[in-house]
Amino acid sequence: EAGVAQSPRYKIIEKRQSVAFWCNPISGHATLYWYQQILGQGPKLLIQFQNNGVVDDSQLPKDRFSAERLKGVDSTLKIQPAKLEDSAVYLCASSQDLPYEQYFGPGTRLTVT
Amino acid sequence: AQRVTQPEKLLSVFKGAPVELKCNYSYSGSPELFWYVQYSRQRLQLLLRHISRESIKGFTADLNKGETSFHLKKPFAQEEDSAMYYCALSGGPYGGATNKLIFGTGTLLAVQP
C-alpha cells in the first residue's frame, strides 16, 4: 500500500512569513496526526483528527498554527507568522482506529531564518 | 505528568555485542508502550509494541510496571541495527481518549564493525 505522503520535503522561510504543509494519509485511515520534531527531541503531537473532527489540539499554538482536514482525507498545517523557534521537522502520521499503529510520512523540514 | 525518558543520547557497541536501550515512563494508568525506529534517510516506523510480546529483528522489550520501564534488548547487535530508536507511550482506547503518542528524546544506536 502507498505510504503517507507529505509535501514539500524542505522549506526555508524568513521569520514573520507564512508557510503551509500538506499531508495525504494512507487510504482508509480515519485518524491523522501532525507532530513537530525539534532537533534533538522526540516528536510532539500538535493536532489529531478523527475523520473531519479535531480530537486533540491541546499543544497546538493556536495564535499562529492552524490545521484543517477537509472531507476527512488530506490535511494542511499552516503557520502564520513563523518564528525562529518553529524550525523543526513536521511529521504527518495516520492510523486506523485499531490497533493504533501510526504510519509516518517522510516529514517536512522547515527552517525559519 | 505523562513522560518518557531515554537517558542515553548515544549508545555505541561493537558488532555481536549485546544491546540494551533504556526507557522509563511516567503515566497514571495502564499505558501501551512502543519502540519506534528511524533508519538513515528513512521514515519513522514501528519496531514493536508491548501488547504483541513479539520479537522483531531479534529485538525484544519487556514491560516492567514495578520499575515503569520498557527497555529494548538484543543479544547480538548487527551493523544494520544502527539507527535512531524512540520509546513512546499511548493511553490507548481505554486509558486515554486520543491514542496520541508521547515520545522520548531518542537514543542513537551505533554498531561498530
Image: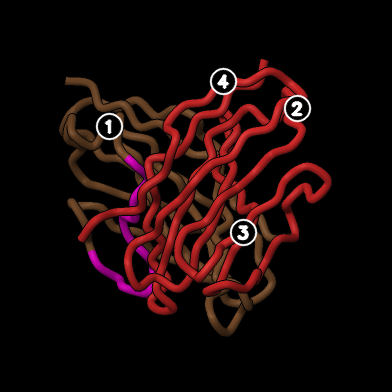
Report the Cα–Cα distance between label 4 and label 1. 30 Å
Task: Give the amino acid at mark 1.
Answer: Ser
Apparent side of residue A42 relative to residue B86 in the rendered image (left or right)? right
Mark 2 — residue? A83
Subunit that carries the residue with mark 3: A
Task: Give the amino acid at mark 3.
Answer: Glu
As displayed, is residue B111 above or below residue B87?
above
* x and y percentages locating residue A18 in the rendered image: 69, 32
Q: Residue at x 30, y 40 (%)?
A: B19
Residue closest to the eye, B94 or A72: A72
Image quadrant for the N terminus of chain B? bottom right
Indicate the secondary structure of the residue bearing disc 4.
Answer: strand
Task: Give the amino acid at mark 4.
Answer: Ile
Q: Which chain is brown?
A: B
Where residue A73 sits, quadrant-wise, is: bottom left
- The colour of chain A is red
